[in-house]
Image (cartoon, rainbow, N blue to C red):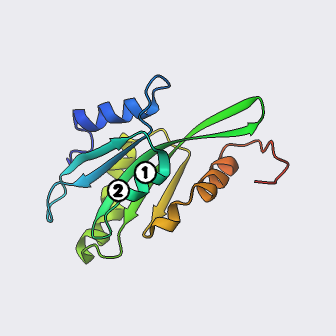
């Protein structure tokens, strides 16, 4: 097993999902340049932008983020996204295995509305991610005005 289901990763996942915790993202990375052992790299409270700033262009990494947005003045939605980061400078074999190994990660980070595949930090623009979450979430309370 890749370690995606390690106690540290499972605890961080529960923390991000908890309404009582300020933690709203986690980052999983490979423990070494070779092999498939995954470890919890970092967690934070600064949302998608902070997570994006932690991504390494030379790595394949996996993120999980809680995104909150308002549908109207009275309601707030909470959705979750899995981020599959394949940095442009990552080694070819690591990139090639990401499609297989991301499956193990997604099994552990099971509750998510969308998957965001990213290779550049601009792929994680919050407006774009929220627009995708709205579409995935069913009702659009903005009359289509994202």
Q: Image height check: is 11 above or below 110?
A: above
**With respect to residue 98, does 2 lie above or below?**
above
Where 52 sits versus 23, above or below? Answer: below
* Residue depicted at 45% across the width and 38% down the height: 24
- In which quarter of the view is residue 97 placed? bottom left
Number of residues whose C-alpha sits closer than 10 Å to that of mark 2, classed few (under 14), some (14–19) or many (20 or more): some
Q: Residues within 10 Å of mark 1 (few under 14, many from 20)?
A: some
- Residue 141: x percent and y percent? 80, 42
| Label 1 with label 2: CB-CB less than 8 Å | yes
Residue at 62%, 59% (x, y): give it.
128
Residue 107 located left or right of residue 123:
left
Relative to the observer, which residue lies in front, 69 or 109? 69
Q: Nearer the viewer, residue 74 or 95?
A: 74
Q: Secondary structure at mark 2?
A: helix
Question: Residue reaching furthest top?
Answer: 20
Q: Which residue is mark 1?
A: 50
Secondary structure at badge 1 equals helix
**Disc number placed over residue 59 in the picture, else none:** none
User: Seen from this angle, which residue lies furthest right?
Assistant: 143
Q: Which residue is mark 2?
A: 54
Q: Which of the two residues, 135 or 59, is positioned nearer the viewer here?
A: 59
Q: Percent from the top left, x then y, of residue 139? A: 77, 41
Q: CA distance from mark 1 to mark 2?
A: 7 Å
Image coords of residue 127 (percent x, y): 63, 56
Q: Position of residue 123 (x, y in %)?
A: 51, 65
Q: Is residue 129 above or below residue 110?
A: below
């Amino acid at each position: 097993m890749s370690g995606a289901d390690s106690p540290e990763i499972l605890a961080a996942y529960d923390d991000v999902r908890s309404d009582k915790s300020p933690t709203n993202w986690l980052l999983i990375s490979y423990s070494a340049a070779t092999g498939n052992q995954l470890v919890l790299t970092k967690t934070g409270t600064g949302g998608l932008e902070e997570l994006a700033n932690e991504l390494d262009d030379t790595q394949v990494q996996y993120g999980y983020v809680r995104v909150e947005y308002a549908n109207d003045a009275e309601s707030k939605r909470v959705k979750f996204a899995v981020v599959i980061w394949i940095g442009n400078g990552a080694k070819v074999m690591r990139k090639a295995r990401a499609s297989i190994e991301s499956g193990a990660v997604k099994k552990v980070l099971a509750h998510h509305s969308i998957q965001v595949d990213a290779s550049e930090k601009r792929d994680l623009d919050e407006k774009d991610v929220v627009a995708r979450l709205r579409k995935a979430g069913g009702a659009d309370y903005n009359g289509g005005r994202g």
